[in-house]
Amino acid sequence: QVQLVESGGGLVQAGGSLRLSCAASGRTFGRNHMGWFRQGPGKEREFVAGIDWSGTIRYYADSVKGRFTISRDNAKNTVYLQMNGLKPEDTAVYYCNTDVIGRDGRSPWGQGTQVTVSS
């Protein structure tokens, strides 16, 4: 069983930046794609970004393309999300997942980290 701990969220003004981290422990994620998802107030959880094992294939939701960058450190079992140019509509709880297939997360979810962007 994999355990995920997300961190790095907080309150930031529009236009600001945050860097999220997700540390995985327990069963290693091997060559799985990893990714980030988010759930805004009153909304369903949605895909944000994904990355393959080598880090060379990265894909994003249209709403964050050009502003967010996903990366991973396999030696540390950690995936990151650098978020620049934040907008109030980015306000959400952000979750990582260590078994992303397409734009679905298949591993158990962690507690997430809250990101709040003020206008």
Image (cartoon, rainbow, N blue to C red):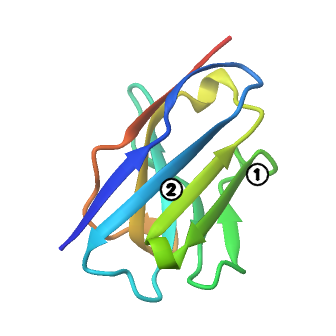
| Residue type (three-letter) at the residue carrying disc 1 | Lys
Q: Residue at x 73, y 26 (%)?
A: 16
Secondary structure at numbered mark 2:
strand
Along the line of sight, the residue nearer the viewer: 74 or 113: 74
Residue 101 is at least partly visible in this image: no
Label 2 Cα neighbours within 10 Å, binned few <14 / some 14-19 / many ≥20? many
Return the disc, 1 or 2, that comes first in the chain's sequence: 2
The reply, left or right, for residue 108 in relation to residue 57 is left
Q: Position of residue 70 (x, y in %)?
A: 64, 60
Residue 26 figure quarter = bottom left
Residue 96 figure quarter = bottom left
The reply, left or right, for residue 26 in relation to residue 52 is left
Residue 87 figure quarter = top right
Farthest top residue? 119
Secondary structure at numbered mark 1:
loop
Label 1 Cα neighbours within 10 Å, binned few <14 / some 14-19 / many ≥20? few
The reply, left or right, for residue 17 in relation to residue 52 is right
Residue 68 is at least partly visible in this image: yes
Instruction: Kindly identify which residue carries mark 2.
Output: 36
| Residue type (three-letter) at the residue carrying disc 2 | Trp
Alpha carbon separation for disc pair 1 and 2: 13 Å
Q: Position of residue 113 (x, y in %)?
A: 40, 38
The reply, left or right, for residue 86 in relation to residue 114 is right
Instruction: Kindly identify which residue carries mark 1.
Output: 65
Q: How many marks?
A: 2
Query: Which corner quadrant holds the N terminus?
Result: bottom left
Query: Which corner quadrant holds the C terminus?
Result: top right
Q: Position of residue 78 (x, y in %)?
A: 47, 65
Q: Residue at x 60, y 32 (%)?
A: 90
Q: Position of residue 15 (x, y in %)?
A: 77, 24
Q: Residue at x 69, y 71 (%)?
A: 58
